[in-house]
Image (cartoon, coloured by chain):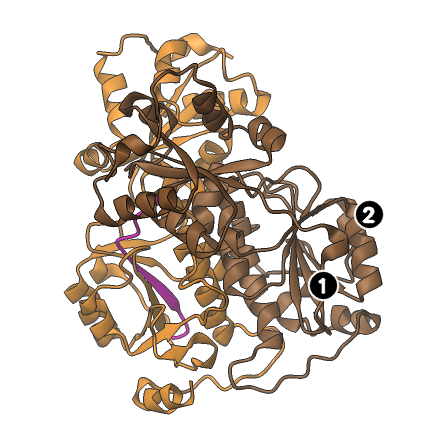
Chain colours: A orange, B brown
């Protein structure tokens, strides 16, 4: 590999290194609109999904994997800018337990609320204040696997571009549509597009297995500790719960989101059963009294 | 609080401190049969669930919470042995991002295979080689919330007593029954007790939504990277998959376990539907051909 084609950066005070490192912090990501990805698999997925790669960085002595070397070469040849980091700087930067010697800076892709197109049979996800970026990334991965149309990041307390979220998403965030908006903007969007809002809470009145709602629909999940805010509960047409057994009072938020996304998604894409799925939010009370 | 009642440990070479610290490693836990818990909530849950607390440790200047101080006092008065750690040693030990100044050493509780009692309508979980202790702990939490009878740790590659597993289990592991066994022992147990074994894999032939199996049943989940081993697949009466959409080829293992446990568990405890749940493994082929 012609590692001399990318300039070497070996001083911690080098502006290029400082920029890369700053992307580990919320401020750095917010200021630049960029984020970090690490590892051969993630960089390859970013290329495959045509993610807007800003630049690449690598450390030749660690990047021993043939495929990884080929990937770096391909990126350089296609005109992507990049830097070669000294072993010491790379070690300072990496968050991987087994560093692979390559990473990239990618532009965050946000969809404007006005540009969201709502198909009649689409399922959406809204997240509010997820504390753990690992949980958020896992939720993004599940959302992709469930075929959601896009993810609303409601408020400022969840960052899909945090390193742990990127890692846990396993590449799903490259193809996912993200919309950042306020509660009010979300409520207006749902109303104007005729989207049924399904909130979730351990104290929701409706057993999630009894939910039959029309489409399009959006599932809302709140933070690990506080759940959904009062305002988002008010916005919800249904409030569903996952019934608990044993001494647990709740599930992990990513597990709960998975169970609910699969269940709500199955209403649209059943395996080979025919189900009745045409109840509007107007008859919500029927179901609440049944649960 | 009479903090002088517990002896002060302030030297890193003190045997008591070395023992506590060793419980952060698999070797230390395996050698002693003990494990570490940290934080007021976990210690309180251990007390509540009558977990076999071996000893308690705390650091008075960090333990500012009233309830936490009361808890430490209560433990001391009830004759639980303990140590007071110097601030420096406590900081060396803690894995918490916001340390609360209290923790405990607890005895691991394993159930012998011969002592497992299988109720006719019980659901069991078997895990094999879960790489991430956080995922394992989340699975334990979900298992408790789904009312499983107990968890089989098949093989030596998953440790429910690892600090990250304990943390993610949110106290669920105190009341859970754990059985460590080999694949052969698990297979013999399932056969002799008439337990239907439901394996899971992204390439399973049967859509999990089409599974109708008789009880008792055991769900098997494998590692994040490799899934179930060939031998456990052979042991399984059914192999179910969660169908994927988008570009994902799999879900996070804790999310997958959650979706499957809820779904299999719902066969036993439906919300208000009546379902047919009496298919034996003999007609597995019917369902596989349907999927």
The spot of residue A219 in percent (x, y) is 35, 67
Quadrant of the rendered image containing residue A109 = top left
The residue under label 1 is B117
Q: Which residue is mark 2?
A: B184
In the rendered structure, which segment of residues is drawn in magenta?
A120-133
Provide residue B205's location: percent of width, then percent of height.
Answer: 72, 61
Image: A170 above or below B178: above
User: Where in the figure is residue A161, as x and y percent of width and height?
Assistant: 31, 41
Q: Is residue A97 magenta?
A: no
B101 or A287, which is in the foreground? B101
Q: Chain of mark 1?
A: B
At a point 58% along the width and 63% down the height, the residue shown is B261
Quarter the C terminus of chain B occupies: bottom right
Q: Position of residue A174 (x, y in %)?
A: 40, 45
Dot 1: element = loop
Quadrant housing residue A202? bottom left
The Cα–Cα distance between marks 1 and 2, rounded to whole angstroms, is: 19 Å
- The part of the image, by quadrant, that contains residue A5 is top left
Q: Can I make out residue B245 in this image? A: no
Q: In the depicted view, which residue is nearer to us: A95 or A152?
A: A95
Ranked by sequence position, the earlier of labels 1 and 2 is 1
């Amino acid at each position: 590999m012609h590692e001399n084609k990318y300039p070497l950066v070996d001083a911690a005070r080098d502006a290029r290194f400082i920029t890369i490192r700053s992307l580990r912090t919320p401020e750095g990501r917010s200021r630049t609109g960029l984020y970090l990805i690490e590892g051969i698999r993630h960089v390859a997925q970013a290329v495959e999904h045509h993610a807007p790669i800003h630049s690449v960085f690598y450390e030749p002595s660690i990047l021993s994997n043939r495929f990884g070397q080929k990937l770096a070469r391909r990126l350089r040849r296609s005109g992507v800018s990049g830097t070669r980091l000294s072993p010491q700087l790379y070690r300072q930067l990496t968050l991987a337990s087994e560093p692979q010697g390559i990473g990239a800076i990618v532009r965050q892709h946000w969809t404007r609320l006005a540009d969201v197109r709502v198909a009649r049979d689409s399922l959406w996800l809204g997240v509010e204040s997820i504390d753990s970026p690992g949980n958020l990334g896992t939720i993004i991965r599940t959302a992709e696997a469930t075929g959601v149309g896009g993810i609303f990041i409601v408020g400022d307390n969840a960052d899909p571009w945090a390193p742990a979220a990127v890692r846990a998403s396993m590449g799903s965030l490259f193809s996912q549509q993200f919309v950042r908006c306020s509660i009010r903007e979300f409520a207006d969007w749902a109303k104007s597009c005729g989207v049924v809002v399904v909130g979730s809470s351990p104290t929701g009145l409706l057993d999630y297995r009894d939910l039959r709602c029309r489409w399009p629909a959006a599932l809302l999940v709140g933070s690990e500790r506080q759940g959904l805010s009062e305002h988002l509960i008010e916005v919800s047409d249904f409030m569903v719960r996952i019934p608990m057994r044993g001494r647990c009072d709740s599930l992990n938020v990513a597990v709960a989101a998975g169970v609910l996304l699969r269940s709500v998604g199955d209403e649209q894409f059943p395996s080979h059963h025919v189900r009745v799925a045409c109840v509007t939010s107007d008859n919500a009370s029927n179901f609440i009294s049944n649960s």
